[in-house]
Amino acid sequence: AYEPQGQNNSMTIDEMRILHRTALSEAESKRTELRLVLASRYRELVGSSDEVISMKERAEELNALVVALPELVERVVQSADASDSGGSIETLTTDESPSKVGKEEEESSLVAVRSELSRLPREIHRCLDDKNVHGAAAALISLFEVISSRSKSYPLANLLSGSKQIPDNIANSPLLETQMRMVYLHVQTLPTRVEKLA
């Protein structure tokens, strides 16, 4: 404790003033550095909170989809069961008639539509993986033409298909409606991806 006092006693007034100014400057520098660090940490905290809010919103959207999924699956199963039982009863109880032929043609048409709804999304992704923008765009438009030929409920499909004749009343099975909805939700963001690749 005595040594610093001895140093202070041996220093001149000018040296003490210089030492005082240096100490004040260093203290101010440290305060500024601390303020900058705190401001940086605050910005990081605000950014993190925005990300947390965004993640929460996405989690809620995903939760809503997951909650709705069992109902969709149940509807698909019920529709499949109904179409299976309906088809077997029809085979047993009706003869060959024009109405039966018309129903068979409609069923054949539905099978073809469902087949295209299954094939075209795979084709689009295959083209995108190969960076074939033209092929992906053509397959996407074909898919939207298939959807718009059966429903007016999908504005993007109706717009991009270029279809002028959109049917008013087509009897779609619940299975087909569900498949169209799921395919449409799956591919509705693909035009943006195709545009980015282009």
Image: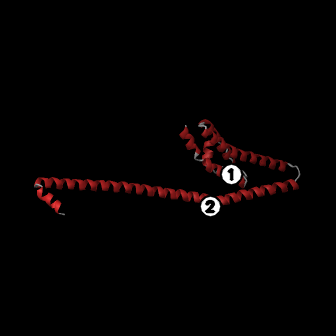
> x, y (%) of residue 28?
24, 55
Q: Which is more foreground, mark 1 or mark 2?
A: 2
Tell whether 47 sits left or right of 62: left
The secondary structure type at the circle numbered 1 is helix
- Say which residue appears at 53% left-offset and 40% top-offset: 196
Tell whether 128 sits left or right of 91: left
> Residue 184 or 153: which is nearer the viewer?
184
Amino acid type, label 1: Gln
Does residue 162 appear in this view?
Answer: no
> x, y (%) of residue 79?
74, 57
> Residue 42 or 119: which is nearer the viewer?
42
Residue 20 against residue 123 in the figure, above or below: below
Quarter of the image for the N terminus: give it. bottom left
Tell whether 11 sits left or right of 135: left
Q: Quadrant of residue 87?
A: bottom right
Amino acid type, label 2: Val
Mark 2 burial class by Cα count in 10 Å: few <14, some 14-19, many 20+: few
> Residue 34 or 121: which is nearer the viewer?
34
- Say which residue appears at 31% left-offset and 56% top-offset: 34
Residue linked to disc 2 = 67
- Say which residue appears at 58% left-offset and 59% top-offset: 63
> x, y (%) of residue 143?
66, 43
The tag earlier along the polypeptide, 1 or 2, is: 2
> x, y (%) of residue 41?
38, 56
Colour mapping: secondary structure
Residue linked to disc 1 = 179
Mark 1 burial class by Cα count in 10 Å: few <14, some 14-19, many 20+: some
Does residue 67 appear in this view?
Answer: yes
